[in-house]
Image (spheres, helix red, strand yellow):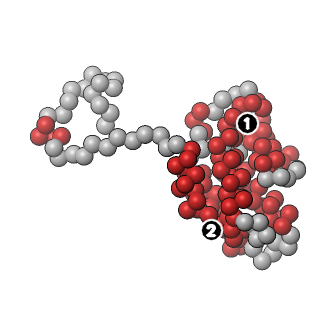
Amino acid sequence: MNPPSVGGGRTDLPPSLQNLMSTVSLSTMLDEEISIIAQKYRDPYEITDRKAPGSKLLNLTLKIHFEILKEVKKTTGQSYPKLQPNLRHLQNLQAILQGVNDVLGDQVKTQQQMKYLQAAAVSLVYAGPFPHEEARRAARTFIFKSLGLDGAEEW
């Protein structure tokens, strides 16, 4: 519950009730904190990036994570503050990459095929939520370029 001073004209709870509760104050996570936590998600990146270290894909994903809204705004001129990436995006991407490896790992013949699958997974998580096609296209283009690939338009 917000403090009484924040809207609604509520009064303070009596001390007898306040003593029964714990007060928790939360703040927004810093990019550095998200990066530290993201290192815990490193295993699927290493599994799906056979020839390159997993940290390379993880670092590229973090770059996308932190810069995608700026890039989409730069390209489209529109701002999407409600789509701020968070740890849930990294968790979803981890699950998709793990699934890609479990289902298709043995069928992927080249590093290039794996990179396109990774780009598709990153696009699903980061470009999919944008409400306008122009923004999704700009996000996919940024993702593919960040991963060193062409062909974002085909996806």
Q: CA distance from mark 2 to mark 1?
A: 28 Å
Please rate how many residues cluster around mark 2, counting C-alpha atoms within 10 Å: few if below 14, some from 14 to 19, many from 20.
some
Residue 9 in the image, given as x and y percentages of width and height = 27, 22
Dot 2: element: helix
Say whether residue 123 is left or right of residue 81: right
State which quadrant residue 38 falls in. Answer: bottom right
Q: Is residue 84 above or below residue 97?
A: above
Q: Is residue 11 visible?
A: yes
Q: Residue furthest bottom?
A: 106
Residue 70 in the image, given as x and y percentages of width and height = 69, 34
Residue kind at label 1, given as amino acid type: Glu
State which quadrant residue 102 falls in. Answer: bottom right
Q: Is residue 149 above or below residue 8?
A: below
* Residue at 55% across, 62% down: 40
Say whether residue 153 is left or right of residue 140: right
Dot 1: element: helix
* Residue at 57% across, 35% down: 82
Residue situated in front as seen by the camera: 15 or 33: 33
Instruction: Please name the residue that numbered disc 1 is placed on.
Output: 71
Q: Is residue 133 visible?
A: no
Q: Is residue 45 above or below residue 82?
A: below
Q: Which quadrant is home to the N terminus?
A: top left
Callout 2 touching callout 1 (CB < 8 Å): no
State which quadrant residue 136 falls in. Answer: top right
Residue situated in front as seen by the camera: 133 or 46: 46
Instruction: Please name the residue that numbered disc 2 is placed on.
Output: 43
Sequence-first disc among 2 and 1: 2
Residue kind at label 2, given as amino acid type: Asp
Residue 145 in the image, given as x and y percentages of width and height = 82, 47
Residue 147 in the image, given as x and y percentages of width and height = 79, 53
